[in-house]
Image (cartoon, rainbow, N blue to C red):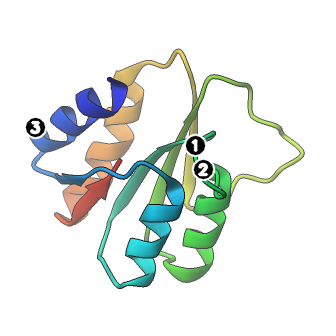
Amino acid sequence: MLRQVLAELITELNGRCEQFTTCDDLYRALLAGRPYTLVITDHITPGSMQGIELASAAEQGWPGLTVIIMSGHERNESVPLPSNSHYFQKPLQITDLLDVAENILKTSQRNVPL
């Protein structure tokens, strides 16, 4: 449900959304050369790759790609957050997340996978 709401809000910000079930699926799309400006993901997702791992891979392979990670759990401070990432703990203020997304989308109008 949150994914659908975020997709609608990103669309209202003139972004284009693509939705993926797993970080693994999104990572394959990145490897295939699909251009994205912003990724919004949960930290814990189905599949072998989690949100923080996706952010780390994006930092290495796609340095301009920003990743927003959401989680119902506190962030483990012993695991460094990649420099391209923002972490929001649920429950979150959706306006805080949208402020970050809007600032990123102002500079580019590429797809935003959720």
**Residue, far front:** 47
**71 relative to 93, above or below:** below
- Horizontal relation, residue 31 to residue 79: left or right: left
Amino acid at dot 2: Gly
**Residue, far right:** 78
Question: Which marked residue is nearer to the observer: mark 2 or mark 3?
Answer: 2
In percent of width and height, residue 9 lies at 19, 33
Task: Give the residue pinned by disc 3.
Answer: 12
In percent of width and height, residue 41 lies at 48, 45
- Horizontal relation, residue 26 to residue 34: left or right: right
What secondary structure is found at the residue carrying circle 1?
loop
The quadrant the N terminus occupies is top left
Residue 83 visible in this rendered orientation of the protein: no
Which numbered circle lies on residue 45?
1
The residue carrying pointer 2 sits among few (fewer than 14), some (14 to 19) or many (20 or more) residues within 10 Å by Cα, namely many
Q: CA distance from mark 2 to mark 1?
A: 7 Å
Which numbered circle lies on residue 21?
none
Which numbered circle lies on residue 51?
2
The residue carrying pointer 3 sits among few (fewer than 14), some (14 to 19) or many (20 or more) residues within 10 Å by Cα, namely few
Q: CA distance from mark 3 to mark 1?
A: 26 Å
What secondary structure is found at the residue carrying circle 2?
helix
- Horizontal relation, residue 51 to residue 99: left or right: right
Q: Nearer the viewer, residue 94 or 22?
A: 22
Question: Which marked residue is nearer to the observer: mark 3 or mark 1?
Answer: 1
In percent of width and height, residue 86 lies at 55, 45
Amino acid at dot 3: Glu
Circles 2 and 1, Cβ within 8 Å, touching? The answer is yes
First along the sequence among labels 2 and 3: 3
Amino acid at dot 1: Thr
Residue shown at the point (64%, 51%) measured from the top left = 50
- Horizontal relation, residue 50 to residue 62: left or right: right
Q: CA distance from mark 2 to mark 3?
A: 24 Å
